[in-house]
Image (cartoon, rainbow, N blue to C red):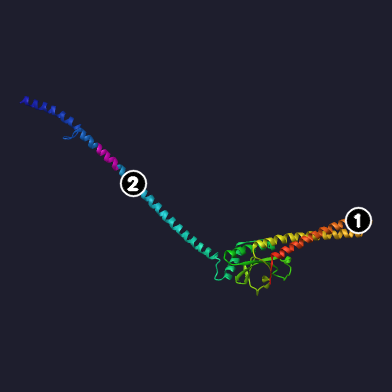
């Protein structure tokens, strides 16, 4: 009986390390390589799960950011749409404001001169400034298919000499042979029964002729001033000649007088030539 117990104990001691050795490796029935493979797959699955969870978190953050960006974009679109609507309204208003076409040529001409006056400012007016303004309105009328002439004269006092003209304006042909006066400095129409002097004076068929006229007038005025100065100096020389104390002095002043008179005559000749050129350019309006 004693021997059997010892055998059993020894057998148990031999088997127990084997069992302990098995606990340190794969579970019973699974090889170590299979176990390692499963553990690797589990680790990989866990990594993928972590990555998926992170991606889900990122997507949620991205969605929140996208939603915020979408909301901002929608607000910007709404703002731009409102701005576009305002610009369309302004454009329509500008188109209406700058649409010169009227129901009649007279209405079109009135719109043009009114627009011109509203968009041009001059600190002072004289014949040359008025001429430039009239030339510009003439061009605008031609662009709308309305024939016109540029007129010069005096709108306050009747005159018979073109040299005395101090103003320029436009006469638009609103019907065959019928003209409408346009006051460019005031941006308005002047009817004949308001001021008939707008329908009298001298006319030019184009701004080029008006420009040539102004150049001749400018030269004419300078030569008139020079002619008057020469005449004054000639009169002084004549007085000195008449009051000379001796013959030598008288002869000297006489030579000076004759030279001044000759120069004055030269200026008068040039003035006559300029006047002929001016009258050829301008047609009388009656």
- The residue drawn where x is 47% and y is 61% is 85
Residue 125 placement, left or right of 39: right
Can you see residue 126? no
Task: Residue 233: name its quadrant.
Answer: bottom right
Can you see residue 278? yes
Q: What's the mark number on residue 189?
A: none
Task: Residue 139: name its quadrant.
Answer: bottom right
- The residue drawn where x is 57% and y is 70% is 105
Q: How crowded is mark 1: few (under 14 residues within 10 Å), some or many (20 or more)?
A: few
Residue 142 placement, left or right of 73: right
In front here: 86 or 237? 237
Placement of the C terminus among the 4 image quadrants: bottom right
For the stretch drawn in magenta, the main secondary structure is helix
Q: What's the mark number on residue 57?
A: 2
Residue most extreme to the bottom? 193
Placement of the N terminus among the 4 image quadrants: top left
Magenta range is 40-49
- The residue drawn where x is 41% and y is 56% is 74
User: Which residue is the site of mark 1?
Assistant: 251
Q: From the viewer's perspective, is residue 19 above or below residue 170?
A: above
Q: Where is residue 137 in the image (x, y as percent from the top left)?
A: 62, 64
Confirm whether the magenta stretch covers residue 103.
no
Label 2: element kind = helix
Label 1: element kind = helix
Residue most extreme to the top? 3
CA distance for labels 2 and 1: 120 Å
Confirm whether the magenta stretch covers residue 44.
yes
Task: Residue 46: name its quadrant.
Answer: top left
- The residue drawn where x is 9% and y is 27% is 8
Q: Earlier in the sequence, mark 2 or mark 1?
A: 2
């Amino acid at each position: 009986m004693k021997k059997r117990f010892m055998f059993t104990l020894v057998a148990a001691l031999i088997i127990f390390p084997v069992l302990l050795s098995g606990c340190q490796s794969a579970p019973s029935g699974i090889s170590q390589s299979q176990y390692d493979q499963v553990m690797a797959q589990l680790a990989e699955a866990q990594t993928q799960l972590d990555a998926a969870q992170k991606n889900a978190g990122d997507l949620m953050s991205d969605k929140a950011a996208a939603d915020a960006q979408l909301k901002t974009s929608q607000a910007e679109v709404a703002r731009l749409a409102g701005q576009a609507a305002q610009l369309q309204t302004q454009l329509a208003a500008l188109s209406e404001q700058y649409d010169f076409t009227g129901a009649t040529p007279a209405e079109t001409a009135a719109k043009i001169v009114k627009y011109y006056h509203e968009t041009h400012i001059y600190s002072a007016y004289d014949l040359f400034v008025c001429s430039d303004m009239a030339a510009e309105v003439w061009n605008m009328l031609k662009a709308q298919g309305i024939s016109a002439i540029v007129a010069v004269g005096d709108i306050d006092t009747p005159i018979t000499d073109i040299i005395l003209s101090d103003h320029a304006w436009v006469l638009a042909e609103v019907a065959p042979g019928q003209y409408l006066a346009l006051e460019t400095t005031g941006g308005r129409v002047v009817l004949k029964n308001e001021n008939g002097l707008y329908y009298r004076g001298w006319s030019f068929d184009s701004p080029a002729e008006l420009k040539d006229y102004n150049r001749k007038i400018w030269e004419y005025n300078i030569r008139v001033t020079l002619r008057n100065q020469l005449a004054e100096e000639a009169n002084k020389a004549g007085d000195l000649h008449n009051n000379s104390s001796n013959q030598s002095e008288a002869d000297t002043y006489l030579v000076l007088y004759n030279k001044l008179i000759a120069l004055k005559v030269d200026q008068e000749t040039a003035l006559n030539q300029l006047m002929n050129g001016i009258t050829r350019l301008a047609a009388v309006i009656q």
